[in-house]
């Protein structure tokens, strides 16, 4: 999907690799490349200009963190601005609901109706589909066949010309099902009677959601449809179809986002499986070829939950061996520490090299050593003199050297924490992580 856009964005960013300073010429060149890529994906000129301006100013004005390379610094900004450009996603609740599908003829409504039915079916809900298209010949057969393939009941009546009557019957006969999806008719243009019919259908079915289906090939023109249907029935979600077949998807996405209608799904193929939940973060990450970052951010969040880091203790200035262990445990859950630290927006903080060196095997050893310390020693490691060290080592089947190493590491961590507190005023791991996940 959007392969050429993705390739040109990645190429543009590649040019920054190995640079040590963010200079104006490099940023200008990057911005020009980005503009070219976005415009050829049919993104609106005004949006492209706004985006370029934001990227240029932020890249030059914001101080790059010492632990981030120039490329990472700019990549992060490009990423955030692109997400902002298409930031429009909506919730899909897994509960009983009626969904009205709107859109012009040929946009992919019927195909998408089956895809959406399949989506809810896979989530374990009882789904039924109603064919309210009495305009297009063969509309019922088309929907019926698609539904048959995925084993979803389809209600319709090719003899009946009144869409409201069919829908009324459909609602009645499917009253025991949980999710009902109503496929409606579309004409070639936004005709007044088409709009009138969908208004009446919407009132009749008391739709929980009104989703608009638009063809990605429309590019930025998608916004006109989104606006018209929104005025009529209050569109609360857009599905962009045929992303697999056009280079203009970027235009459709940004145009729809601009109308403030959330994008629910993206269709990218003709079978009922070719539907993807739209999520701006993941989408842009993949576009820029940085899928890992998101996964990493998710792991960071999990670690916060699991590690239960007590930021307040750290703030109060007391940092015990117990705290250290907790920190290490939490950080280790996230994967290679160094990689994570490189991505954290730590300002101009430089972490001592040794902080990265604790492996999980080491941690197990440290845990055993700490288990043979007394409570008082854990709270106040300065109590540990050489005779205590002997005792601890003996109890843990270890050597005094290893105990000394643990204490040395503890001091290093303590200094680091103090440094963080001094540098940032406030040290709050949770906040740090939040900022980190904000750049997913
Ligand atoms: N490649 C591709 N084709 C699609 C997609 N969605 C729909 N189509 C095709 O677009 C054509 C029109 O789709 P249809 O569902 O009948 O549109 P409707 O008139 O809005 O109901 C059909 O040939 C579909 O197979 C998609 O995401 N990708
Ligand atoms: Mg149709």
Image (cartoon, grey):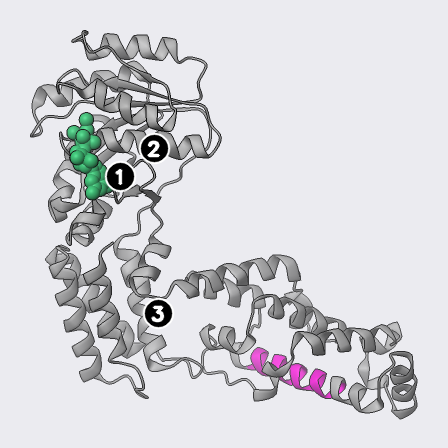
Name the residue beneath numbered marker 3: 76
- Mark 2 packing: few (<14 Cα in 10 Å), some, or many (20+)? many
Q: Is residue 162 above or below residue 83?
A: above
In space, the residues marked 1 and 2 are separated at their CA atoms by: 10 Å
Counting labels gives: 3
The residue singled out by tag 2 in the image is 116
Q: Earlier in the sequence, mark 1 or mark 2?
A: 2
- Which of the two discs, 1 and 3, labels the residue nearer the N terminus? 3
Magenta residues span 407-422
Where residue 379 sits: x, y (%)?
Answer: 81, 75
Which element is circle 3 on? helix
| Separation of residues labelled 3 and 2 (CA atoms) | 33 Å
Which of the image's four quarters has the C terminus? Answer: bottom left
Image x and y of residue 406, in percent: 75, 84
Residue at (87, 79) in percent of width and height: 396
Mark 1 near ligand 1 (CB under 8 Å)?
Answer: no
Camera-side mark, 1 or 2: 2
Looking at the image, is mark 3 or mark 2 nearer the viewer?
2
- Cα separation between marks 1 and 3: 28 Å
Find numbered disc 2 in the image and state the secondary structure of the residue it sits on. Answer: helix
Ligand 2, what quadrant?
top left
Q: Position of residue 380 (x, y in %)?
A: 81, 79
- Please name the residue that numbered disc 1 is placed on: 239
Residue 288 percent coordinates (x, y) = 30, 65
Q: Are marks 1 and 2 in contact (CB under 8 Å)?
A: yes
Secondary element at image label 1: strand
Q: Residue at x 27, y 81 (%)?
A: 16
Asked if residue 333 lies left or right of residue 242, the reply is right
Check contact, mark 1 vs mark 3: CB within 8 A.
Answer: no
Instruction: Residue 67: tell me if it is visible.
Output: yes
Tell me the chief SS of the magenta region. helix
Precedes in sequence: disc 3 or disc 2: 3
């Amino acid at each position: 999907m959007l392969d050429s856009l993705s390739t040109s964005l990645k190429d543009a960013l590649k040019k920054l690799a190995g640079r040590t300073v963010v200079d104006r010429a490099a940023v200008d060149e990057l911005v020009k490349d980005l503009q070219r890529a976005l415009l050829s994906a049919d993104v609106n000129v005004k949006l492209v200009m706004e985006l370029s301006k934001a990227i240029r100013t932020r890249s030059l004005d914001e101080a790059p963190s010492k632990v981030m390379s120039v490329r990472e610094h700019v990549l992060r900004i490009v990423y955030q601005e692109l997400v902002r450009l298409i930031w429009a996603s909506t919730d899909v609740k897994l509960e009983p609901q009626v969904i009205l599908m709107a859109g012009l003829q040929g946009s992919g409504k019927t195909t998408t109706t089956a895809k959406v039915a399949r989506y809810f079916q896979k989530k374990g809900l009882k789904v039924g589909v109603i064919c309210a298209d009495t305009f297009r010949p063969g509309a019922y057969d088309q929907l019926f066949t698609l539904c048959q393939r995925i084993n979803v009941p389809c209600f319709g009546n090719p003899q009946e010309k009144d869409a409201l009557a069919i829908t009324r019957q459909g609602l009645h006969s499917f009253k025991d099902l949980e999710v009902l999806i109503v496929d409606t008719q579309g004409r070639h243009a936004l005709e007044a009677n088409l709009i009138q019919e969908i208004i009446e259908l919407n009132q009749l079915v008391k739709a929980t959601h009104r989703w608009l289906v638009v063809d990605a090939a429309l590019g930025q023109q998608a916004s006109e449809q989104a606006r018209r249907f929104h005025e009529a029935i209050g569109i609360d979600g857009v599905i962009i179809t045929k992303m697999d077949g056009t280079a203009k998807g970027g235009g459709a996405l940004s145009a729809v986002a601009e109308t403030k209608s959330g994008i629910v799904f993206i269709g990218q193929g003709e079978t009922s499986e070719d539907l993807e939940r739209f999520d701006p973060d993941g989408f842009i990450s993949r576009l820029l070829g940085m899928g890992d970052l998101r996964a990493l951010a998710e792991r960071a969040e999990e670690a916060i939950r699991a590690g239960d880091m007590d930021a307040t203790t750290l703030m109060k200035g007391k940092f015990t061996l117990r705290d250290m262990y907790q920190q290490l445990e939490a950080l280790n859950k996230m994967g290679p520490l160094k990689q994570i630290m490189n991505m954290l927006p730590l300002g101009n903080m430089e972490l001592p090299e040794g902080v990265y060196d604790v492996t999980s095997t080491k941690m197990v050893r440290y845990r055993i050593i700490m288990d043979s310390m007394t409570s008082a020693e854990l709270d106040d490691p300065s109590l540990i003199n050489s005779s205590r060290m002997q005792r601890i080592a003996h109890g843990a089947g270890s050597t005094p050297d290893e105990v000394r190493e643990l204490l040395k590491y503890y001091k290093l961590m303590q200094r680091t924490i103090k440094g963080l507190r001094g540098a940032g005023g406030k040290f709050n791991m949770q906040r740090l992580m939040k900022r980190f996940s904000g750049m997913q």
